[in-house]
Structures are given as structure tokens and as C-alpha cells.
């Protein structure tokens, strides 16, 4: 999945002169957490609610001297900014966010900023990939890790004319095996479970023993 | 002076039958009706054969293209039908299926109307409760969504505030989706978690949207949940939220596929729950809305050992007519040979050994926390809505 299909394309940016106080108001009003900072059409930094929090003095001090919140975001922003390209994959975005412990990535192409991708965009994409919105039953199957094994399983689904809504590979600790979760479009997977077991597959979920 | 209860039934409701081996077996309606008559707790004057709903009535929720595909499936290609969820192993087409599905809708609409007109306090349509059907899609054995159609009728004609209580093992996704933005309908579904079970939706975080935020409630329950935890969740979630909402009418979906013996699900509930829940709903209806209660059937795929007893208990609690602990011999003799099984001799499950689950404490805790989260997420909103 490419970032361009998941990112938000309406991005509000600010200039470095904007004050901490103004930045707080923008985040609050728009219910967002990240503001790219742009100067002469170039992305020069990003300011998040965490930057603002770290730069905001304690309330008792603000009351005495409100001017403390008049520092500019240019002074407190994170720079340089880690960015991605619209044709990067969401896998790239996920590993960058995880590695650098950040909540968003501006998407930059050619002239400048064309979008932004945040944690919640990734979660929404994950949700869609798992087929969470379409009705179906989930089967968790353990299989040998060898070429052609998936074709054997999908042959069984085809025999019962049941549509596959999503497929995920789940890491396990059992050597030379793989676990895969299939969401299939039926309320009654019993015959399929039986056929899978007859063909030698281990259906590990739903498990029927209750242990 | 209104009569207490009406039982909506007619043999022709059993024409809603996909095929011989299909798990959705309409014989369960006859088995239940016959058991109630063998118990002498269902009188002929209480049974009404409901009218078939019209296509126009069905169109108050379902889309025209979908209804055409159901009513004239012979003229459609397999591909077209597949687009509407029809012609699959779950929802195969069958002769006159449109009329059969409309007959069920007719029963639920009749019940809703009769209750609001004050002809009866309670109505039971065990053929209804087809909670998975969507606006333009058949799903999970459900063609037309009788529940959504009845609620729409109640909203339009009576501006009623409706609580919908769904204790089927599967999430009531079709009903939830239809009223996801509507604060006049509180949908509460407790069901086996969608981790494995169809349809996969129904997590605590599904709370409604827009004006309807806080008016969709879900409690996903762990596989192997037993009566104590199932009933505690009902008491701690369904009862307080229904009270907070102050409905004009309660609709319950009484699917009984949460039973330990049900082949499609993984819960471990027994007759204790199927006796207690309708009794609690009955009390709520009298406490909150002058008794207005429309009860429906739903899932239940063990047609011999589970469904007739579970659904007889709904009528028994609705009418306050106690059932003897022994199943009438006439009923057993009549059906045992046909079933090819040894049928239960008692209305309770005292004979049933539900194996002790080692993880029971963990399951109970997980269910409890899910229930608490559900209540905490919405109770303020529901109470606030009353101003």
C-alpha cells in the first residue's frame, strides 16, 4: 500500500514566526497534533504537541508573565524533519515512526509538502487491511513454510465457493511453520475447517478445547 | 383492555428454508410451538398468523436493486446475485424466497404495530430477528432485516424511543449499522468476540457516530463464557443503560446460539441464561414502558437439543406461565424418532455437563472489563441526552 493512498492531503502549515500560544490554539481547534513549519515554500521543521508541551512553562509562571508563550515555533521546532515520498509504502512509514518514536511524517515531493501521514492514518489502513469492516469468520491456520502451500489452502476455499476478505501472516516460534489468519465471507466455516484438517492443516483458531 | 401477549406464528413461516442441509432450520419454529402446546401454555386464541409484508414496506430500508434481486432472483446472473450476498453457501437462493422473507418481516411489523396500538403488551415472533441483513446485502442467513424495518416503522409512525437488546452469539451488525447515527435508537449487543466468530465486528469501541455517538453499545464476550459471566454482563450493562435511556418500547433479539451445544459458536451458556434474560427484559418493559416488548428469535443451530426449550422459555417468561421441569412425554414421543437423537427430558440443563474451563477466571475478568468499558463510554451521554 502506498503512502499516497493513505495520507491526508489537506495539510495546515505555519511559518516559523508563529508563537507557541498560536500553535496551541491551532492544534486545539483542529484536533490535530502536528504542524509542519514552512518558510519560502520549504519545509524547515515540524512542531508537535510534545514540542509545545516541553517548551511551555508551568502555569504559575505563565500567569505572572504571559509573554513566555510568545516565543516562536521556529525556536522550538524539531529540525531537520524526517519525511517520506508519496510513492513510499506504508511499511516504510511504519518503520520510520517506530524507529524514531514520532507520530507523523510530512509527505514531500518535487516542490514541497503534498501531504502528511500520522499514526491514526496507519491504524486506519491496518484496520482496512484486516478486513475489519466486512462481515466474515476468522481462521488461524498453521502451515509448513514451503512454496505452494498457500495455493493448497486457497483451493480448499475455492471448493466451498467462499470469498477471502483478508489474509495476514503472523510470526510464530515454531520452526519451519507459518501462521496465517484468513478472514472468510461465511458465518458457517465448519465444513471448511473439516476439509482443512483432512488435508493435514492445523487449524489453531478458533480452538475448541478452551485451554 | 389489552390482552397480554400474542404469539406470531403460522406453518408457512417455515418456507424460509435455504436447503435441506442448511444450518438455519425452520423446523425449530414448529418444534417450539408444539412444545408450548404440549405444555398447555399456548392457547389457540393467542396465535396469530401475520400478514406478508409488502415490497413497499421492505423498501423502507432495503435498496430497490437489492429487493429486485431477491424477488426476481431467477432473472439475475450468479455474479449479480453474488454482489448482493445471494447464491453463496450461507445465503443460497430458493423458490419464493422474497415472499418467505417478507412473511417474517410481516410478523415483526405486525407485532410492533399491535403493541403500539395497545392491542397487546407483548408480542413474540420467533421467525424474526434476522439481524445481519444490510440495506443492500444478504448476510449470515438473513435476507430482509425485519428488526430494522420494525424500528423504522416505530420511529416514523410513533416517534418512539427504542431500545434494541441483542443477546445472539453473533454481533447484531445490520441493526447497529442502520441506526449508527440515530440517538433515538439505543442498540445493545452482547456477543462472542469477533476474534474468530462472524461477522467480526462489535468491539467496545463501536459507539455510534455523529448524533448517534453513545447510542451503540457492544460487549464482546470471550469464547467459553459461562452463565454467571453472561448474566452478570447483562445485569451490569443492559439493565442500567436501558433504564438510563427510558425507552417507549423494548425489542429483544433472542438468538440462542450462545448455548454450549451450538455447533456454530464457542460460548458455554446454558438454559439458565435463556430463562433469566427474557424474565429480566419482561421486568424492564413493565418498569419502563408500560410493558411494551417485542421479542424475536434469531440464531440457534442446535434445533433439537437447544432451540425448542430456549424459545419456549421466552414465551413462558413473557406470559408468566411456569413450565414443569419435565418435558411433556407427548412431545418427546412425537419428535424423538424423527430427531434420531436422545432429546433432553428436562426444560433445564441440569443433565448437561459443561466442562470446567481452566481459564474461567481470566474469561470472567475480561468480560467484566469489557462491560465496564462499554458502560463508562456511554452512560454519561445517554443520561445527558434526557436533558
Image (cartoon, coloured by chain):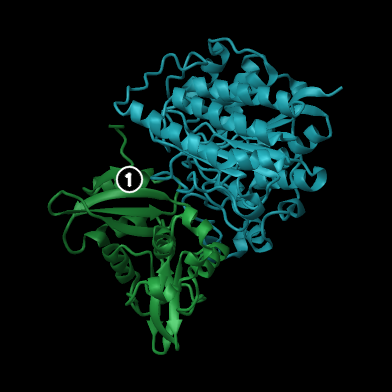
Q: Is residue B8 visible?
A: no
User: Which residue position is annotated with label 1?
Assistant: A193
Q: Is residue B350 above or below residue A171?
A: above
- The residue drawn where x is 48% and y is 53% is A60
Q: Which SS class for mark 1?
A: helix
In x, y percent, where is residue A16?
45, 79
Residue B362, position as x, y percentages in the image = 34, 30
Depth check: give the residue in front, B239 or A129.
B239
Where B65 falls versus B52 (above or below)? below
Q: Residue furthest front?
A: A64
Q: Is residue A107 visible?
A: yes
Colour given to chain A in the rendered image = green
Looking at this view, is A178 or A1 the one in front?
A: A1
Left or right, residue B35 beside residue B108: left
Chain coloured cyan in this rendering: B
Q: Quadrant of residue B236?
A: top right
Where B275 falls versus B17 (above or below)? above
Q: Is residue A164 placed above or below B208 in the rendered structure?
A: below
Give the number of callouts.
1
Amino acid at each position: 500500500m502506498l503512502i499516497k493512498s493513505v495520507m491526508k492531503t489537506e495539510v495546515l502549515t505555519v511559518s516559523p514566526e508563529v508563537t507557541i500560544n498560536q500553535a496551541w490554539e491551532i492544534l486545539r481547534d483542529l484536533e490535530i497534533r502536528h504542524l509542519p513549519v514552512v518558510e519560502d515554500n520549504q519545509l524547515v521543521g515540524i512542531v508537535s504537541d510534545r514540542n509545545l508541551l516541553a517548551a511551555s512553562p508551568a502555569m504559575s509562571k505563565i500567569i505572572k508573565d504571559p509573554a513566555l508563550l510568545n516565543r516562536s515555533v521556529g525556536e522550538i521546532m524539531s529540525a531537520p524533519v524526517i519525511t517520506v515520498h508519496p510513492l513510499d509504502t506504508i511499511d516504510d512509514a511504519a518503520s520510520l515512526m517506530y524507529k524514531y518514536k514520532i507520530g507523523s511524517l510530512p509527505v514531500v515531493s518535487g516542490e514541497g509538502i503534498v501531504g502528511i501521514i500520522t499514526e491514526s492514518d496507519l491504524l486506519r489502513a491496518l484496520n482496512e487491511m484486516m478486513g475489519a469492516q466486512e462481515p466474515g469468520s476468522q481462521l488461524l491456520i498453521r502451515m509448513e513454510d514451503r512454496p505452494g502451500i498457500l495455493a493448497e489452502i486457497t483451493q480448499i476455499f475455492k471448493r466451498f465457493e467462499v470469498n477471502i476478505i483478508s489474509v495476514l501472516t503472523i510470526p510464530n516460534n515454531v520452526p519451519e511453520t507459518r501462521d496465517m489468519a484468513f478472514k472468510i465471507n461465511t458465518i458457517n466455516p465448519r465444513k471448511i475447517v473439516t476439509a482443512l484438517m483432512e488435508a493435514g492443516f492445523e487449524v489453531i483458531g478458533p480452538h475448541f478445547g478452551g485451554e | 383492555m389489552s390482552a397480554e401477549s400474542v404469539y406470531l406464528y403460522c406453518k408457512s413461516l417455515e418456507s424460509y428454508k435455504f436447503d435441506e442441509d442448511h444450518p438455519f432450520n425452520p423446523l425449530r419454529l414448529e418444534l417450539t410451538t408444539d412444545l408450548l402446546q404440549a405444555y398447555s401454555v399456548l392457547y389457540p386464541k393467542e396465535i396469530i398468523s401475520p400478514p406478508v409484508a409488502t415490497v413497499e414496506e421492505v423498501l423502507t430500508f432495503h435498496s430497490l436493486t437489492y429487493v429486485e434481486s431477491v424477488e426476481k432472483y431467477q432473472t439475475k446472473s450468479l455474479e449479480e446475485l453474488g454482489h448482493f450476498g445471494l447464491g453463496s453457501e450461507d445465503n443460497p437462493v430458493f423458490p419464493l424466497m422474497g415472499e418467505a422473507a417478507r412473511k417474517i418481516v410481516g410478523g415483526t411489523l405486525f407485532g410492533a404495530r399491535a403493541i403500539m396500538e395497545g392491542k397487546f403488551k407483548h408480542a413474540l415472533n420467533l421467525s424474526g430477528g434476522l439481524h445481519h441483513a444490510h440495506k443492500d446485502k444478504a448476510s449470515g442467513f438473513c435476507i430482509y432485516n425485519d428488526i430494522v424495518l420494525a424500528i423504522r416503522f416505530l420511529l416514523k409512525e410513533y416517534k418512539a424511543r427504542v431500545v434494541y437488546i441483542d443477546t445472539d452469539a453473533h454481533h447484531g451488525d445490520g441493526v447497529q449499522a442502520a441506526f449508527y447515527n440515530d440517538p433515538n435508537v439505543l442498540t445493545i449487543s452482547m456477543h462472542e468476540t469477533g476474534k474468530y466468530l462472524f461477522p467480526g465486528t462489535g468491539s467496545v469501541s463501536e459507539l455510534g457516530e455523529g448524533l448517534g455517538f453513545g447510542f451503540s453499545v457492544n460487549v464482546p464476550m470471550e469464547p467459553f463464557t459461562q452463565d454467571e459471566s453472561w448474566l452478570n454482563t447483562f445485569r451490569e450493562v443492559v439493565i442500567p443503560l436501558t433504564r438510563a435511556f427510558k425507552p417507549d418500547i423494548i425489542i429483544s433479539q433472542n438468538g440462542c446460539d450462545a448455548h454450549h451445544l451450538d455447533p456454530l459458536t464457542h460460548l458455554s451458556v446454558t438454559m439458565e441464561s435463556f430463562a433469566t434474560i427474557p424474565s429480566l427484559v419482561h421486568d424492564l418493559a413493565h418498569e419502563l414502558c408500560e410493558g411494551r416488548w417485542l421479542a424475536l428469535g434469531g440464531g440457534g443451530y442446535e434445533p433439537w437439543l437447544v432451540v425448542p426449550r430456549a424459545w419456549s422459555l421466552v414465551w413462558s417468561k413473557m406470559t408468566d406461565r411456569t413450565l414443569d421441569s419435565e418435558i411433556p412425554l407427548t412431545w418427546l414421543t412425537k419428535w424423538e424418532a424423527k430427531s434420531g437423537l436422545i432429546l433432553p427430558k428436562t426444560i433445564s440443563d441440569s443433565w448437561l455437563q459443561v466442562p470446567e474451563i481452566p481459564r474461567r477466571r481470566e474469561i470472567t475478568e475480561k468480560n467484566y472489563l469489557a462491560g465496564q468499558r462499554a458502560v463508562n463510554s456511554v452512560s454519561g451521554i445517554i443520561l445527558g441526552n434526557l436533558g
